[in-house]
Amino acid sequence: MNIASNIETVQEKIRCAAEKAGRNPDEITLIAVTKTVDSEAARQVMQAGVLDLGENRVQSFLDKYEALGDEPRWHIIGHLQTNKVKYIIGKVQLIHSVDSLHLAEEINKKALALGLSQDILFQFNISGETSKSGAAEEEAERIFEALSKLQGISVRGLMTMAPLLADDSETKQVFAGLRKLSEKISNWQYPNISMDYLSMGMSGDFEAAISEGANLVRIGSALFK
Ligand SMILES: *Cc1c(COP(=O)(O)O)cnc(C)c1O
């Protein structure tokens, strides 16, 4: 496993996909998803210049946080239970996987108790596939009206995952759907809500995601093979 060279390959593909879409590659951030590797491998990622690291489970985040501290920017990307929120507030840059108002309210409460505002993304299930977490698009207005009133969180954008077995056109439709939803939400002009980030695209589909406007791509297996 040559992490540095894998990173270089992926970054080159990100650049190509951006240019093909007429976008500036510098506006796309690679988040290295380190969930399958240890802290030593995560350190190699950082040495190769990638300082955004993603973890999907709180415990594996905490293990790595103990080893690597605040030097990387930490992203929580997996389903988060409300009873685990207290362990991560103040340590993570961005929580991508906020998929219910209930969870957002818990994050808000814990952040306010620490005198912080936590940046989050809201996760939607655009495909409607039942195995995927994320809120339904139809819920967006109700949810965002409520989110806009929570002072302990700052909503910075949206996140989604494409269905596992989707073909290319279905995958693109899901990513385009999230982009359109973010434009719609942006037009509502709720206070405390910005649509700076679209977190979409993994090892198998990040190029499609970039062509649909992703600016945070979450990539694991392509870096650690
Ligand atoms: C594991 C994971 C990724 C990275 O997936 P790869 O296919 O390994 O690139 C991205 N996002 C989420 C939410 C994940 O759980």
Image (cartoon, rainbow, N blue to C red):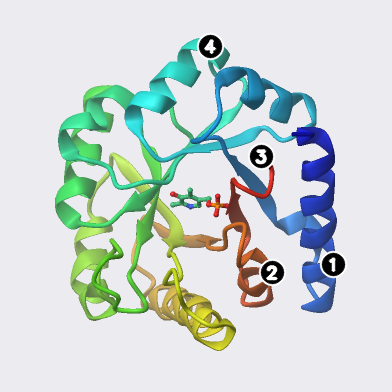
The residue where tag 2 is placed is: 207
Give the mark nearest the N terminus, 1 or 4: 1
3D distance between C-alphas at marks 1 and 2? 9 Å
Name the residue nearer the viewer: 88 or 221.
221
x, y percent for residue 180: 47, 82
The residue where tag 4 is placed is: 67
Q: Are marks 1 and 2 in contact (CB under 8 Å)?
A: yes
Please identify, in this view, whether the residue under mark 3 or under mark 1 is nearer the observer.
3
The residue where tag 1 is placed is: 16
The secondary structure type at the circle numbered 1 is helix
Residue 197 falls in image quadrant: bottom right
Q: Is residue 152 above or below residue 28?
A: above
Disc 3 residue type (three-letter): Phe
Residue at the spot 62% in from the left edge and 72% down from the top edge: 213
Does 178 sit left or right of 98 as displayed? right
Disc 2 residue type (three-letter): Glu
Residue 25 falls in image quadrant: bottom right
3D distance between C-alphas at marks 3 and 1? 21 Å
